[in-house]
DNA sequence: TTGTAAGCGTTATCAA
DNA sequence: TTGATAACGCTTACAA
């Protein structure tokens, strides 16, 4: 104990080149525990790592000493010694604060953090846009992480080569536009979501469903369109409105679709589109849901607060994040060695905007 | 080079006690660079760390070799050697996925990540609720992080003692309920926000402003109430409605306030409260904003999509996160040694719900 | 079941 | 301006 106390002073070292100062109170180390108990450091290490080849008695004495001296293994030393970090990184592709705060991000991250923590890992978050991809590569090159969760937008040849060369496990969140048959990824079942939405509207008695999407250039919007087309096969001619990103042309195109094409229901690709569709209809005094029904992708927290409350295709982003994390950890621990592609189920959350007949 | 090539095979080691497998391709190390250039490892280390005591020529040769061999310093070894991790942790107190996805979180995290990355750190996110505080303490005990950003809800005596004992710098996000005069924290200026809101409503011609809050037990809601009271001093008797968390009683209390107390404006503590206030008024055919004005705290992405669009007190959560990160890094690098308390400015975002006279 | 000793890849002290 | 060398605190093959 005297030996230990001697070490409990604070000492200062020089200022680093980068302006940092190193000032660290000496902590209790594995040697202190070993000395205290009268065993060797390797024996202590064995109990830290749950090695079974140890006598019950020694283990108990060591554990008692660790608790008494408030010993905690130094992760920096462990990382170096065993070539791991117990850290996984989630890369985000947010070019502004709003992209960062989309719904997908929130619930998925919550799930990812939970899984990861449960399995003894920590979660690092990096914005891929900040540094044009270099943030991811330096994490890998410098061996700061054991694995990666990447947004599909980060999937590019250069990065994949790097990850392969560095032997870094990863999982893609969202079906990537390229190499999608070679990689492990998890995505929402957008196609099925569209089919469920159309089925729901038809079941409610709407006969002519129009799809409203921003564009059909991304993988997920194509899948949504495909599902829509498939659901309509042999029932009604499809009608897709691509509104671009400013939504202002919905003001005319939505009422037009109702009057000229007999549309009586809209499947909207996101909540803001749904809002603009609703607004355009209200302006023309077209009643929702009596005359026209609306359903939207994504159950945004505010869908329930729209007037009328919006029926939504709920994409289970919690599940999405959970599976991504589980697959990644499976790969890190070599329990999963093949590629995997998983689609997460959707569900319809039924609210007033699509209640043609009677109350919900 | 031959020496280097020899190392480029993959070799397997045993399965670890915890089920992990160690399989690592030997990377290029500082020794390889040293050998290649014909200098000692310490010289290479000096150029890595930007040490100036090095001849221009040697530096160039070393940098060239590092680029050629695609060398990247191993962070695990650096962390051990210099007692740092270049990692800062952000603790969240989310007990469900919804708390996790509040607005505050999103924009603040975006800002924190940006600052941190800029200063050469990485951001770790941990949910304090998952493990009842133990996630934070193990991060600190095991020396995984150089500093912490804590939610005010995590401020408790035990944790503060630990942080002091371990000499771990931290900044609190949100004014803590205890020790607020001893700690470094950053918060939105809630009191000023209320004052601005009242001033705005009065300026618009509303004469009798009512405050609607969930409760007055948290620091931030007290500040909002204090600001409200202060703004009203000598002008009108204050009227505070505490609605609890299910909001259903607003349905009767809001119209009551209008009819019996002559209320003609409501300052709501969040968007959902504002929604319920609006709904209660609409039910009684009380017109917004002609008869009654509404303003809410927090410019939630959907405030603009309410009917009518909601005027909001914008709390600059981007700034909040930015300052928290900057203060923390200042502390880590010993540029800041005293305690600090900072309030972030608010602003009113003017929309229809408070436009008593004329258009916006 | 335990101990010895080498190694993980850097950084830092001290001497040259 | 550079090089030897000893840390940093842990893990693990190998020997006992």
Image: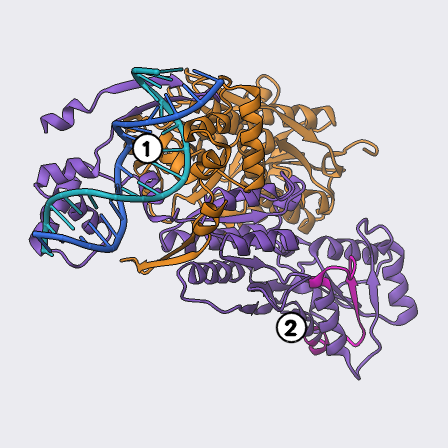
Chain colours: A purple, B orange, C cyan, D blue
Disc 1 to disc 2: CB gap under 8 Å: no
Question: What's the residue at 53%, 24% (across, down)?
Answer: B58
Crowding near pointer 1: few (<14 within 10 Å), some, many (20+)?
some
Q: Which mark identifies residue B156?
A: 1
Magenta residues span: A199-221
Question: What's the residue at 55%, 27% (across, down)?
Answer: B190
Is B219 on the left-hand or right-hand side of A54?
A: right
Disc 1: host chain:
B
- In this view, the residue in front, A168 or B327, is A168
> SS class of the residue under badge 2?
helix
Q: What residue sits right under mark 2 in the picture?
A: A192
Residue B313 visible? The answer is yes
Percent x, y of residue A55 = 9, 56
- In this view, the residue in front, A68 or B198, is A68
Q: Quadrant of the C terminus of chain B?
A: top right
Question: What's the residue at 11%, 37% (across, down)?
Answer: A35
Is B269 on the left-hand or right-hand side of B39?
A: right
- Quadrant of the image occupied by residue A181: bottom right
Disc 2: host chain:
A
Percent x, y of residue A215 = 79, 59
- In this view, the residue in front, D10 or A102, is D10
Between marks 1 and 2, how big is the CA–CA gap? Answer: 48 Å
């Amino acid at each position: 104990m005297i030996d230990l106390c001697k070490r409990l002073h604070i000492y200062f070292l020089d200022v680093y080149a980068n302006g940092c100062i190193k000032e660290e109170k000496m902590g209790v180390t594995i040697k202190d525990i070993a000395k205290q108990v009268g065993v060797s450091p390797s024996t202590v290490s064995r109990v830290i790592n749950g090695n079974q080849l140890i006598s019950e008695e020694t283990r108990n004495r060591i554990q008692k000493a660790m608790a008494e001296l408030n010993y905690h293994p130094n992760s920096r030393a462990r990382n170096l010694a065993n070539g791991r970090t117990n850290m996984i990184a989630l890369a985000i592709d947010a070019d502004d604060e709003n992209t960062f705060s989309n719904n997908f991000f929130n619930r998925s991250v919550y799930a990812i953090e939970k899984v990861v923590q449960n399995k003894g890992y920590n979660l690092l978050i990096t914005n891929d846009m900040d540094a044009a991809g270099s943030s991811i590569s330096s994490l890998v090159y410098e061996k700061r992480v054991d694995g990666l969760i990447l947004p599909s937008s980060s999937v590019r040849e250069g990065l994949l080569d790097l990850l392969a060369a560095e032997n870094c496990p990863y999982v893609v969140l969202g079906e990537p536009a390229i190499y999608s048959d070679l990689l492990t990824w998890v995505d929402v079942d957008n196609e099925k979501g569209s089919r469920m939405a159309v089925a729901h509207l038809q079941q409610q008695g709407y006969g002519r469903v129009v799809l409203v999407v921003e564009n059909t250039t991304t993988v997920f919007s194509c899948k949504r369109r495909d599902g829509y087309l498939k659901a309509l096969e042999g029932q009604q001619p499809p009608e897709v409105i691509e509104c671009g990103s400013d939504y202002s042309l919905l003001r005319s195109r939505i009422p037009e679709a109702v009057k000229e094409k007999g549309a009586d229901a809209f499947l909207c690709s996101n909540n803001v589109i749904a809002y603009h569709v609703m607004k355009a209809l209200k302006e023309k005094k077209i009643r929702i849901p009596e005359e026209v029904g609306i359903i939207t992708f994504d159950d945004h927290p505010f869908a329930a607060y729209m007037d009328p409350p919006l029926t939504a295709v709920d994409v289970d982003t919690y599940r999405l994040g959970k599976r991504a994390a589980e697959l990644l950890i499976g790969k890190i621990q070599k329990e999963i060695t093949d590629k995997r592609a998983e689609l997460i189920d959707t569900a319809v959350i039924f609210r007033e905007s699509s209640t043609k007949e009677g109350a919900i």
